[in-house]
Image: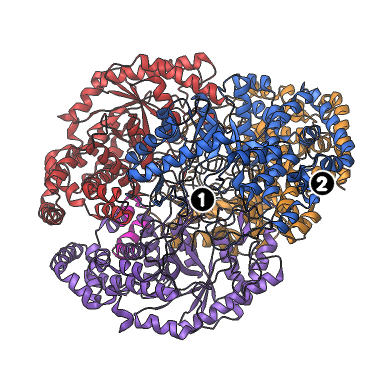
Chain colours: A red, B blue, C orange, D purple
Amino acid sequence: MNQISHIRPVDRDYRAGLNRPLEAEAARDYEFLGEKLARRDIDIEQVTAQVARFSVAVPSWGTGTGGTRFARFPGDGEPASVFDRIEDCAVINSLTGATPTISPHFPWDEVPDYAALRAHAEALGVGFDAVNSNTFQDHPAHAAHPLSYKFGSLSHTDPAVRAQAIAHNIDCIRAGEALGSKALTIWIGDGSNFPGQSHFGQAFERYIASVQQVAASLPPDWTLFLEHKIHEPAFYSTVIQDWGSSLLAAQAVGPQARCLVDLGHHAPNVNIEMIVARLIHAGKLAGFHFNDSKYGDDDLDAGAIDPFRLFLVFHELVDAERAGRLDVAPAYMIDQSHNVTDPIESLISSAIEIQRAYAQALLVDRMALSEYQEGNDAMMANQVLKRAFTTDVAPILATARFRKGAAIEPLAAYRASGYRQACAGRRPKRAGGGGGIV
Amino acid sequence: MNQISHIRPVDRDYRAGLNRPLEAEAARDYEFLGEKLARRDIDIEQVTAQVARFSVAVPSWGTGTGGTRFARFPGDGEPASVFDRIEDCAVINSLTGATPTISPHFPWDEVPDYAALRAHAEALGVGFDAVNSNTFQDHPAHAAHPLSYKFGSLSHTDPAVRAQAIAHNIDCIRAGEALGSKALTIWIGDGSNFPGQSHFGQAFERYIASVQQVAASLPPDWTLFLEHKIHEPAFYSTVIQDWGSSLLAAQAVGPQARCLVDLGHHAPNVNIEMIVARLIHAGKLAGFHFNDSKYGDDDLDAGAIDPFRLFLVFHELVDAERAGRLDVAPAYMIDQSHNVTDPIESLISSAIEIQRAYAQALLVDRMALSEYQEGNDAMMANQVLKRAFTTDVAPILATARFRKGAAIEPLAAYRASGYRQACAGRRPKRAGGGGGIV
Amino acid sequence: MNQISHIRPVDRDYRAGLNRPLEAEAARDYEFLGEKLARRDIDIEQVTAQVARFSVAVPSWGTGTGGTRFARFPGDGEPASVFDRIEDCAVINSLTGATPTISPHFPWDEVPDYAALRAHAEALGVGFDAVNSNTFQDHPAHAAHPLSYKFGSLSHTDPAVRAQAIAHNIDCIRAGEALGSKALTIWIGDGSNFPGQSHFGQAFERYIASVQQVAASLPPDWTLFLEHKIHEPAFYSTVIQDWGSSLLAAQAVGPQARCLVDLGHHAPNVNIEMIVARLIHAGKLAGFHFNDSKYGDDDLDAGAIDPFRLFLVFHELVDAERAGRLDVAPAYMIDQSHNVTDPIESLISSAIEIQRAYAQALLVDRMALSEYQEGNDAMMANQVLKRAFTTDVAPILATARFRKGAAIEPLAAYRASGYRQACAGRRPKRAGGGGGIV
Amino acid sequence: MNQISHIRPVDRDYRAGLNRPLEAEAARDYEFLGEKLARRDIDIEQVTAQVARFSVAVPSWGTGTGGTRFARFPGDGEPASVFDRIEDCAVINSLTGATPTISPHFPWDEVPDYAALRAHAEALGVGFDAVNSNTFQDHPAHAAHPLSYKFGSLSHTDPAVRAQAIAHNIDCIRAGEALGSKALTIWIGDGSNFPGQSHFGQAFERYIASVQQVAASLPPDWTLFLEHKIHEPAFYSTVIQDWGSSLLAAQAVGPQARCLVDLGHHAPNVNIEMIVARLIHAGKLAGFHFNDSKYGDDDLDAGAIDPFRLFLVFHELVDAERAGRLDVAPAYMIDQSHNVTDPIESLISSAIEIQRAYAQALLVDRMALSEYQEGNDAMMANQVLKRAFTTDVAPILATARFRKGAAIEPLAAYRASGYRQACAGRRPKRAGGGGGIV
């Protein structure tokens, strides 16, 4: 197919050729890990099978170089259209075998013909995950957005702005239906920068009423993901500042509404894995926007700063799943800003880190853990987690990829393919320059 | 009455004598402030009347010198019994006119004859507010507490420990009934220090089931205050770590359960006034444990570190009350640790700072604010709050005290009374030494 | 002068006309405050005189609407050139009488003829403060910046990039000399987003060597201001992450180098007034970038979030000045991002809040405070600060403005002048749209 | 030797017996890891040799159960004297082979005859590391401490208190000389709880002058370790709040003074590995108090919360050592509070985690890392660190222990020995009860 001819990493034979010299070593590592795990009564094949089934969606917007309010430093060969972005996502999925779906963002990914877009994606082996609306920016060139979101969107004091934001969200649902999505993620920038600027209670009520209107247009098999964030772009208050507000809103909207956890949207020191446990308890966990952070919503690559925290999140998820406490399977999505790396490389690496945390969580000896917890043996309970986390699961991840026809070494395969340089040749150079600050 | 004879500040004539030379100046300051407020269409008399009606409970445990895990440095004349503690609280109320009730803590304040304790308090002009249970410490000398709370209480894995903790809470209710209280505050130290030590979901379910049992013993006109805290004494996770968990628990327990906000129990940077607004929205705000903090649960004097934040909290409360959004009046209590000051002085000063924030919040021009909010005039909305906050309301506070027969200058009156020195003479010296660390 | 004719607030008669109906009330408030302060042995005239001498520089870049990485929502009549920005600054100074200087930023404020720029400013009654270099953005259209700062500037691994950044800083000095400045502020975005990306030690050494080269071009009566920041735009590490690194660098560079404190550049909970005290001790305090923050480098209006903290900073400064501990007068500058307000209004309001904090600090009874500190009377020492902070010093600020011919009510005067609307008519509309994120 | 007869884990034969059935598996794991590392051009024997030479000191005070201000829940068989504490430390060292020295704390570890204490330790195979003074608690029963440290010690306003604190530190040096120590660690609780309570500048100057006096009594081959802490027990300000103040003090005191880094003594989000790099640059790094924390100075077990951060710290140390940037070898000490575990188990586990981080840091391919850093290849630089961190180095640690005659599985060996139960039989039960709060 000519769509694929210029995208070398999508070619299965290309990957197989690169894998060949690595196979023997990978097999040996896998065999020895299998032996070690067998001593712990763990069947490596079961783990590998679960890892192979695991997938995480990549964000279409994450394929372009990100930036800060100070500057954006463009990379070479950045995607210029949603079609380009889908090709980049297909590269990631081909190499990792772990990212078969894309999360689109509107109006950034708006096209006149969604069927064509869907066909383009399917031809490249990828599909679509939750759609995202955007009412945190103005879209002055866009006929459906004549009003400004400077002072809010779904919670704006002006009903006309709220109506515009609601209509946009419904448009997103329609686009998502055409693409095969089953969920809409709502994140808003609404909030305030000054004490007094906004009435906390009224803004929250307006938000809920707006989301209820969006929900009324939701197909019955869709889910609404409500995403909270403590700050930014608003710096004194946000309307959905934490999981508590997200929960109240989801309760008010009804069973189709659930709470999305972005790992970087919390106050310092907050125990995120506990929030996961509480949302599971409440039957309101939607899923995740994975990334990592040290200071705020840094949107760094998943697992880059605190891999143990990522493991602890998956430990909660695996625990809940094993115990039948998950009413629905959580949605896994990456949401990062790739400012200093090739976005494709960051998404490849992040997908692997997320798989790694999941694989480690699968190794937790839950029977032993449960006994230690019951007996308040804090030391041994902790040792159980440590043993799982310090196990080097790379051979499992590599084998799962190899068996799927993905790359044993995805980053190396990507670099060897020359894909980015080829893109640089055929895609227009994007401008960088100042961020929001000037 | 002989109980009062040795407590000079409780003597109205003593206070009147001290007030006399201050009256003229206080009157002049009050008159001028009245003139300024009149220009802003505010009737100072209305404000003063509201301030005069305002009260906050003092904690019986706050009358002793506090400490840290490193050390406790005792003060002179510390109370040796709950009777002493009540006398100290009566001194605070006599001088401020703002603290007519005491919040007791059991088993610290346990006595064989609650009627006698209540009579002692009434003779001194004070009554009792919410009672507090204590299952965060062992009480080895106490027959009702043979089991240790080292690994939890209401959420313990062992049903026998949970039963003991439930029984203790019910005992607290019974004691509170005898004292005239109408609420039980539950704060537990349950949590974990190690990832893996505790099963988040199961611990939460055990907590809820235990609290439901306590609630079943609650008189119909009582309220249950559930208090959350992000960390300490547990340093990896706590069972009720934030207002979201507190809300879930209160929803599960039913209409008598509400969420108590302690100003020092949050993650860094958290917008506490927003939490207040959300709990009001949910109809689940119980009230407050006032104190101030810079780093964690520092338990410093209210208003000592961030007086503007205290004002913003009261701004939400006054706003909700004016708008009829408060289903019940919130409970106001002080909860502080006085490590380097005379506790009576800290409680006097804190009660005044809390009143100050309330008085400032009463000055907010809510009509103007509402218009600016509707019009997204962030600058002017903020100016409205600033104008209220920068108004020096000391003359209102002094006048409210004076008219009640309390002291115009409570700290000076307290120091002049020689009360502490007298206590030092008749109360045994308490030991200091190491805190929990050794 | 025709330059001024279209800038109504710069017209002294315009302001006098607005002041007239406010004078009597202002005089009465001032008189009564004077009476109150006299009781505390404070001569209000001395305070007013000090406040009148106080000034803070405004940032030329702060006159445009700011933004975040998510979006910038433009305002009406935004300045289109440095000449416009100077006019806006002149408006602020005319109305407040407190901002006679402007801090320029290069290459944003670059012009071919600095003498003309200086003359323009002088005609409007304003001069120039510290100049700022910009090596945190690329300037692709600028011949002197062919190389990218994507991976750093003064600490870049590539000597050619470092040389370019050094040359730019020296260019800034030359421009500053032409404008009458006496200081260069260096803030860099250098750092890393990934553990391992940057060698901490070598990057620091490269930074120091580069700054030493800049310092070698410094006129003898100039000062170099080194500004630290914990994060953003780099999200794992920054080269000058805190005042400790800033101090080490300033020590290595020599006596002309000093440490600049931006109130929003610290970790959560950090005691900023303590850092001020330490830099005074070290003889290395340069001055301040004033703003306020709740979460990170929020760049909110000074005093908007934590006015007591601003007061405590000024308390340290006044204390040090009185004690002869300040070797040089600190530089005061505002550095804010005005995303939801008219930037002129925010700068007016911020200048007033900074003056307010200074005026409150002047009221601290330092003799009493010192005695209480010596005697470890924590309660009374704190009361001394509280009494100063809760004093409503608005009459002092208004009187200082009035006596200088500035506006008694600067915000009202600004709004009444129609200046912004006039600008909107003659300045081109600036684009908004996405920030760095897309 | 009869001292040893009752301490089973100290018996080499006991350990050898337990190791025997584990040897074959350990050897196989080690062999395979060696094969994997060889592919990465790493000689496992070199790494194992370095790990075997690595040691960390254990705190004598850490052998007792810790507590919080709320409560201390005693464990069974807690040490009742410094002799007991030394026996516990000997058990830890015998099982891990990694903790040959003990850090004593005075006056807690004060004895009349230090030669006897030293002989007791030597007989058990352990020696003494840095001594610690204690002026954060009162020692009312102690003749040398008649004055209270309630309001400070080395920085107290009263010269008599400072003199007492100085004398105590000098006493610690003398005791340390008798024990064979070479360093004194000074951590003070001095600070304030209220704005205004303390004069920041003067308190710092008094601290420096006091430490200079202590330093004057230091033997020439000793080092003074100055330890900073952001808060607790003081909750508004501390005298040595961060590494910047610590550095200024160490510079003022002279070459024998260096800065000690406790991993839990920083503001939230702070990049601790960067501080390590800066102190190395300044030639002022003393060493570490290892522990882990999520919220504040939680004093949790090293590596329990953020093992990647611990690795990053060791990455800096190994890097500096390889580059010859370390002027002296840093001192490694554990400083933890074991509230819910058997302290011996926590110290065993922590020593292993610290070794693990060191071993992982030894695996970093520094040549490749350096090239990626020079080329700003953030992705591959980060991959280098990840590859080292995700390597399961347990076989190296086990082999290093086995070859030294320590236990392959120290925790299991400890539990099997029945040591704690034996202690419970012969040591008096210690009281628990309330912490500092009541």
Q: How many labels were placed on the picture? A: 2
The quadrant holding residue D418 is bottom left
> Which residue shows up at 73% across the image and 45% down it?
B3
Label located before the other in sequence (1 or 2): 2
Q: Main secondary structure of the magenta part?
A: helix
Amino acid type assigned to the residue bearing label 1 in the image: Ile
Residue D292: give x, y in percent of width and height.
Answer: 41, 57
Of residues C72 and B366, the one nearer the viewer is B366
Residue A57: give x, y in percent of width and height.
Answer: 27, 34
**From the image, which quarter does the N terminus of chain A lie in?**
top left
Of residues A324 and A89, the one nearer the viewer is A324
Magenta range: D357-385
Q: Secondary structure at mark 1?
A: loop
- Binning the other alpha carbons within 10 Å of mark 2 as few (below 14), some (14 to 19) or many (20 upward) gives some
Q: Is residue B233 left or right of residue C3?
A: left
Q: Is residue B94 magenta?
A: no
Report the chain holding disc 2.
C
Looking at the image, residue C401 lies above or below residue D137:
above
The reply to whether residue B434 is visible in this rendering is: yes
Looking at the image, residue C279 lies above or below residue A168:
below
Q: Which residue is mark 1?
A: C230
Q: Which residue is mark 2?
A: C50
Amino acid type assigned to the residue bearing label 2 in the image: Gln
Q: Is residue A406 left or right of residue B217?
A: left
The quadrant holding residue A259 is top left
Residue D189, which numbered label? none
